[in-house]
Image: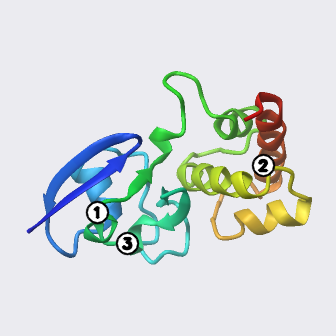
């Protein structure tokens, strides 16, 4: 067993875990944060994407012990209390989600992407979400959501 201490959604967290505990399992089972979904368990679908020090990573491919001392943001940490983040609001407004299984991974991915590229072109938005799989939407509304989130973020300012 290994002690893992890190910041999750702005809160210091600690647990003792086996060396091979995946970050996705650590978040879901040890910390009770079930917003991070586990789909393919091979890093292909993107449903488990979280932000590690602000950068998207696949939680199903990352060992919990490897993130000790770092900061992890899950989908639960994107909102500010009861106020949804611009990305979350945009996905709701533009119907960028249907069944919702892939949504946490899209939300975290798009959040990181828009921090780096606050005014993306269509091809850049498409490329940004290409690593996340959705079986319901056909991606048109997801791309619209990316652009709407960029607009909302620009309206809110720094």
Whether residue 32 appears in this view of the structure is: no
Residue occupied by mark 3: 62
* Left or right relative to 58: residue 16: left
Q: Earlier in the sequence, mark 2 or mark 3?
A: 3
Front position in the image: 70 or 44: 70
Residue occupied by mark 1: 68
* Left or right relative to 120: residue 7: left
How far apart marks 1 and 2 lie (CA) works out to: 31 Å
Mark on residue 96?
Answer: none
Helix, strand or loop under label 2: helix
Q: Earlier in the sequence, mark 1 or mark 2?
A: 1
Nearer to us of marks 1 and 2 is 1
* Left or right relative to 19: residue 100: right
Residue occupied by mark 2: 146
- Residue plotted at (77% across, 32% down): 157
Q: Is residue 147 above or below residue 112?
A: above
Residue positioned most to the top: 82
Q: Quadrant of the C terminus?
A: top right
How far apart marks 2 and 3 lie (CA) works out to: 26 Å
Task: Answer few, some or many: residues within 10 Å of disc 3's Cα (few below 14, many 20 plus, some between 14 and 19).
Answer: some
């Amino acid at each position: 067993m290994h002690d893992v201490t890190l910041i999750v959604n702005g809160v210091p967290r600690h647990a003792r875990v086996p060396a091979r505990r995946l970050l996705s399992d650590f978040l879901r089972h040890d910390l009770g944060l079930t917003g991070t979904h586990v789909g393919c368990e091979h890093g292909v679908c993107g449903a488990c994407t979280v932000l590690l020090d602000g950068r998207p990573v696949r939680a199903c491919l990352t060992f919990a012990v490897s993130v000790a001392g770092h900061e992890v943001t899950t989908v639960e940490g994107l909102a500010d209390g009861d106020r949804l983040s611009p990305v979350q609001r945009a996905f709701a407004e533009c119907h960028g989600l249907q069944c919702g299984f892939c949504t946490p991974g899209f939300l975290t991915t798009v959040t990181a992407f828009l921090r780096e590229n606050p005014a993306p072109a269509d091809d850049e938005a498409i490329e940004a979400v290409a690593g996340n799989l959705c079986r319901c939407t056909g991606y048109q509304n997801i791309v619209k959501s990316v652009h709407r989130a960029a607009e909302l973020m620009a309206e809110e300012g720094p």
